[in-house]
Image (cartoon, grey):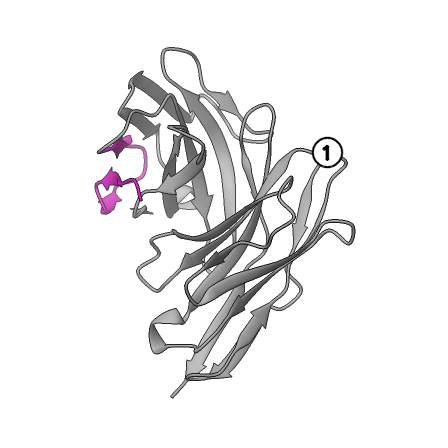
Amino acid sequence: AQTVTQSQPEMSVQEAETVTLSCTYDTSESDYYLFWYKQPPSRQMILVIRQEAYKQQNATENRFSVNFQKAAKSFSLKISDSQLGDAAMYFCAYRSGQGAQKLVFGQGTRLTINP
Amino acid sequence: GAVVSQHPSWVICKSGTSVKIECRSLDFQATTMFWYRQFPKQSLMLMATSNEGSKATYEQGVEKDKFLINHASLTLSTLTVTSAHPEDSSFYICSARDDRGVTDTQYFGPGTRLTVL
């Protein structure tokens, strides 16, 4: 079974600085997708960024980018120019490219932005 | 992104009663929806996969007779917690799979907080 591990329960960063959240996963599959979701205090899960395993280029979405290291099974999220609104729980998630399309979530990292 | 709604956003009920939670995809059709449970300060735990027109697939350890799922249309899935007890109190979140085009992604509803007294 696939597993996702986020080893940083909590992280903090100064406003306007850059922070990187770590995620590793374990799978024997070659076709899969990786995601970062954000859960602010409202608890609404928001998709931040997605990465297809077959793509070598790292995904970017404005201030959010990933460092996808397929061989190392690592998928970190970099947030540049951190803003107060970025404060939230961040979940890394894995989804197989086949079958039921279920998401497997990591434990989450709570990100605090210091003004 | 696509929009998913949940109703109600919160509910309080007495022990032994049943509670129904609705999940709707507002601007797309979803053949597959998912139901999660989240305890405080924890990650999301998948309870079941809901497929339109067929029986739901439950994860190991989830009581299918307690958590009834019905996906009767392409835009609506319901979760009914039957004979609820205080240990069923939790935050329930649904998601809907948007497989239009090349971006096959799950979008989440805002969640329902259930409190059983």
Please report the residue visible at 52 percent of the width from the left and 62 percent of the height from the top. Answer: A65
In the current view of this chain or complex, which residue is farthest to the front? A57
Name the quarter where the C terminus of chain A is drawn. Answer: bottom left
- Using the rendered image of the protein, determine whether residue B15 is visible from the camera's viewpoint: yes
Instruction: From the viewer's side, name the closer residue of B105 and B34.
Output: B105
Instruction: From the viewer's side, name the closer residue of A38 and B23.
Output: A38
Q: What is the three-letter code of the residue carrying label 1? A: Glu
Q: How many marks?
A: 1
Where is A41 relative to A13, above or below? above
Residue A16, how many percent across, how many down? 42, 83
User: Which quarter of the figure has residue A39?
Assistant: bottom left
User: Which quarter of the figure has residue B82?
Assistant: top left
- Using the rendered image of the protein, determine whether residue B85 is visible from the camera's viewpoint: no
Q: Secondary structure at mark 1?
A: loop
Q: Chain of mark 1?
A: A
Please report the residue visible at 64 percent of the width from the left and 42 percent of the height from the top. Answer: A53
Residue B106, how many percent across, how many down? 42, 38
Instruction: From the viewer's side, name the closer residue of B79 and A12.
Output: A12
Residue A40, how many percent across, how many down? 36, 63
Please report the residue visible at 38 percent of the width from the left and 23 percent of the height from the top. Answer: B68
Magenta segment = B1-26
Q: Is residue B50 left or right of residue B70?
A: right
In the current view of this chain or complex, which residue is farthest to the top? B53
Label 1 crowd (10 A; few <14 / some 14-19 / many >=20): few
User: Which quarter of the figure has residue A41?
Assistant: bottom left
> Within the magenta stretch, is there residue A63?
no
Which residue is under mark 1? A29
Residue A85, how many percent across, how many down? 34, 72
Where is A72 relative to B26, above or below? below
Name the quarter where the N terminus of chain A is drawn. Answer: top right
